[in-house]
Amino acid sequence: MISRTRHFRSVLGISIGLLFFAGLGGASSRNEIGYPRVMQGPMVGAVSPNEARIWVRLSSEYPVVVEYGLDFRLTSFEATEPVVAAKADDYTVIITIRDLAPDTEYFYRIKVNNALDRYLRDYPAFRFKTAPVVGAASGFRVAFGSGARFLDDRVQAIWPVVDHLRPDLLLWLGDNIYGDSLDADILREEYRRLRDVVGLQPVIHNVSNLATWDDHDYGLNNHDRTNPIKDEALEIFKQYWANPSYGLADVPGVFFSYRYGAVDFFFLDDRFYRDPNNDPDTTEKTLLGRAQLDWLKTELKQSTAVFKILVSGGGWSSSKGPTGDSWAAFLNERNQIFDFIRDNEIGGVVLISGDSHIGELNMIPWSDHGGYDLYDLVGSPFAQKAPDSWIERRPERRIRPVYFQGSSIGVMDFIFGESPRLIYRVIDIHGRNVWEPFEVEPGELVNGIKSWPAKVNEEERQRQENYERGHGYYETPPTD
């Protein structure tokens, strides 16, 4: 009797299990596609007065939609047309939202495969702000920098500081990842790892991000036009950034111009056409390539902006020497640009750059050549070790001491009204100014004006004078 009962229970249990598998838990009801979801992002890319670009990476070839509106609860919203992710693009998608109002804050959320994203749906709506009307004298804030090395710093404490600063734009000036590989899959993986940094999430969700590249996100260290995977690197860059454009129709590259209110930004590609650093610096040696150089001159000449910001991955100063991985190895071309600015009376030009792993404010005295002083604002690093090589390097003029105590972010505030001006600061991971803010007005960026003597830090002035007397720049001056 006991044996038959056990047999009956065993058969009954097996039967119920089979029924459950075939009905509730079997192949007929199994989820065959997993959970459609966002893997990285969303990230706000370029914004204009009437458009915004949103980047996102999905888990497969699903349709994605952005719902957006003026109410942070999105009780009333509009939706973009669906865009389907493609495996060939590493499942990355860039969605353009059109017909927006200028200088306006919008809220948005992501819908994947006709449902709110499984892991983002409980978050409050993200936000973006459109640009002011072109030419409008509206104040705004720009954060910028370079060198976000995930393997060196997986926490990257600078990002909560950036979030607190609430910039309108975040400019990535190269070495945004450290791919350092000729394997395209490794470059993509480094982008994914960066986009997953916890502290970065509010920044990419809510701030407009624009980027150029430098050697480590282009290929190997100090790579130039000879990079064998430069075309693949360019396609990957275009997959992972939502810039307004890339190069020209017949001139590939990551360069582009961008207008935000009364300021023009000219993002340069310092890698795709670059001759080797070690080549002699003749009039034929080029960093930008002829087509990009001609484009830059045309754009500068046509610009009516109050400030014109030249954005370069590599530093503008001569401090790295004639074969250094910066504009120092291309002084003929650099000086040609500066002469063009002078000869065409193009005012308001300011230089920004990254790469050096230290926060800097340098100046190239083109006032000595009939032009005006060209300030190089250096934002670096986001997350990277500081070197000591800067101790032996002499830019044309240091306006502020080098900041080398850790990661930092460069910040430009554009102030308009009766007295337009640009205020530049370097902010450390605690949110503090590392030195006295620097200010420059458009009237100081015109031919014939020498402005730097009134702006230089007194300590740097004394060091320069000591150096010009034949002593070491950081040497204690002899007493009489």
Image: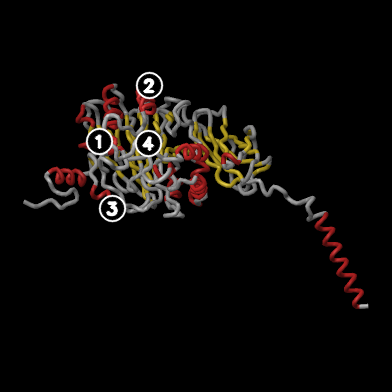
Q: How is the image coloured?
A: secondary structure
Query: Quarter-wise, where is residue 276 in the image?
Result: top left
Do residues under tags 2 and 4 come within 8 Å of each other at their CB atoms?
A: no
Q: Depth-wise, is mark 2 or mark 4 nearer the camera?
A: 4
Q: Is residue 396 visible?
A: yes
Q: Quadrant of the N terminus?
A: bottom right
Q: Depth-wise, is mark 3 or mark 1 nearer the camera?
A: 3
Give the secondary structure at mark 4: loop
- Would you call the spot at circle 1 few (<14 residues within 10 Å), some (14-19), or many (20 or more)? many
Question: What distance separates the C-alpha of mark 2 from that of mark 1?
Answer: 24 Å
Question: What distance separates the C-alpha of mark 2 from that of mark 3?
Answer: 41 Å
Which residue lies under the disc numbered 1?
A: 364
Q: Identify the amino acid type marked 3.
A: Asp
Give the secondary structure at mark 3: loop
Which residue lies under the disc numbered 2?
A: 302
Of pointers 1 and 4, the one earlier in the residue sequence: 4
Instruction: Check residue 239 in the rendering and tell me which mark sits there, or answer none.
Output: none
Do residues under tags 1 and 4 come within 8 Å of each other at their CB atoms?
A: no
Q: Identify the amino acid type marked 2.
A: Gln
Of pointers 2 and 3, the one earlier in the residue sequence: 2
Of pointers 2 and 4, the one earlier in the residue sequence: 4
Which residue lies under the disc numbered 3?
A: 388
Question: Could you say which is closer to the camera, residue 44 or residue 160?
Answer: 44
